[in-house]
Image: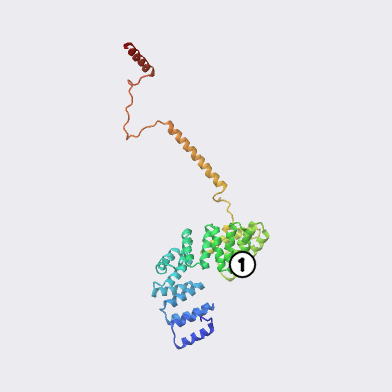
Amino acid sequence: MYLKHFNKAKDQLNNALQLHRHDLTYAMLGKIHLLEGDTDKAIEVYKKAVEFSPENTELLTTLGLLYLQLGAYQKAFEHLGNALTYDPSNYKAILAAGSMMQTHGDFDVALTKYRVVAHTMPESPPLWNNIGMCFFGKKKYVAAISCLKRANYLAPFDWKILYNLGLVHLTMQQYASAFHFLSAAVNFQPRMGELYMLLAVALTNLEDVENAKRSYEQAVALDKCNPLVTLNYAVLLYNQGDQKGALGQYHEMEKRVNTLKESSTLDFDPEMVDMAQKVGAALQVGESLVWTKPVKDSKLKQRATAPSKPSSTQQPLGSNQALGQAMSSAAGYGKTLQLSTGAGASAPLTKPPSLPLEPEPGPEETTSPTESQERRREKRKSRLATE
């Protein structure tokens, strides 16, 4: 098997199973099918292994993970639950069960599962990646970034962690950081079109339109199914005044949507539907798509075209209008301060009641200035007379 002679390895393992069945033999045979990319045959092998050894938690967990990879959540939950029944501290099964709950939007329940795993495997990159995306689903973006950066520290070459970091930074409108992580993910996964699309969204917000167009072209060439790629590209071309190119990308998006509707029952994201209708109205194309009901849980919500469309109602921070409002309110505040200090100066100042009050002069003690001058003159005259 380590020499990549998979056919000879399968023959020898099948001969070993005919002589004497063993858990490890089934596990190695299933691993060879997985290395060849044949998931169905691997599932068949692991099924036979579980029938032979129903209490082997490693086999139950692997079979549950394979069902989870295929989207058969009911069977995956059944086998993972059996594995946890025999071994409640099996971190692989707990992590898989938590990720399945996370997929269905139960972020709090998933976090409780991950808390158990954190005591067993505190330095697991998938664990911190999943915890970070749970916080992302709860819209706690700062906590999500800290967890994802810890996962990136533990596994710096994992493109999925870099992808998630770029996605969170895009959501927080930190486009330079998003470009940094997405470009690193592209270096590790250069054949994924969706990465180029997110990279183009970041470049668009960084006002690098030429490189954004190149990134969109690469995404369209690599990804032939995702309608979000062509929709985002159409929005960029329309904003740049290229209506002909935008119309072509819009028609390509319609073809992809129709293909997806024929091949599967996938629900489309409501933000994508709304943006497609706006672009169609702007291009004066008529609404030829019959959109389905909104999707309940999808990562496409965070990848919609919202970053590339300017909002007309909400002013960004630092605009002239916002600064003008701040300055006018500060001037009004200064006026109120001046009015209050003027009123306070005209009022008589009184001492606190805790201090003893000085006796006020009575009416007999009060003398006029002319009377005091006359008395002084008389005293001087009397002194001169005695001398």
Q: Secondary structure at mark 1?
A: helix
Q: Position of residue 375 (x, y in %)?
A: 35, 15
How many callouts does the rendering have?
Answer: 1
| Residue at the outermost top position | 385
Residue occupying image coordinates x 51% and y 40%: 331
| Residue at the outermost front position | 387
Q: Quadrant of residue 170?
A: bottom right
Examine the rendering and report whether any part of residue 301 can be seen: no
Residue occupying image coordinates x 43% and y 84%: 22
Q: Position of residue 135 (x, y in %)?
A: 46, 61
Q: Quadrant of residue 234?
A: bottom right
Examine the rendering and report whether any part of residue 183 can be seen: yes
Residue occupying image coordinates x 57% and y 67%: 187
| Residue 346 in the figure: left or right of residue 381 | right
Colour scheme employed for the rendering of this structure: rainbow
Mark 1 residue crowding within 10 angstroms, few (<14) / some (14–19) / many (20+): some
Residue identified by numbered label 1: 256
| Residue at the outermost right position | 244
| Residue 128 in the figure: left or right of residue 208 | left
**Eyeballing the image, is 117 above or below 34?**
above
**Eyeballing the image, is 364 above or below 105?**
above
**The one of 283 and 63 positioned closer to us in this rendering:** 63
**The one of 189 and 377 positioned closer to us in this rendering:** 377
| Residue 121 in the figure: left or right of residue 321 | left
Q: Position of residue 236 (x, y in %)?
A: 62, 59
Q: Quadrant of the C terminus?
A: top left
**The one of 125 and 262 positioned closer to us in this rendering:** 125
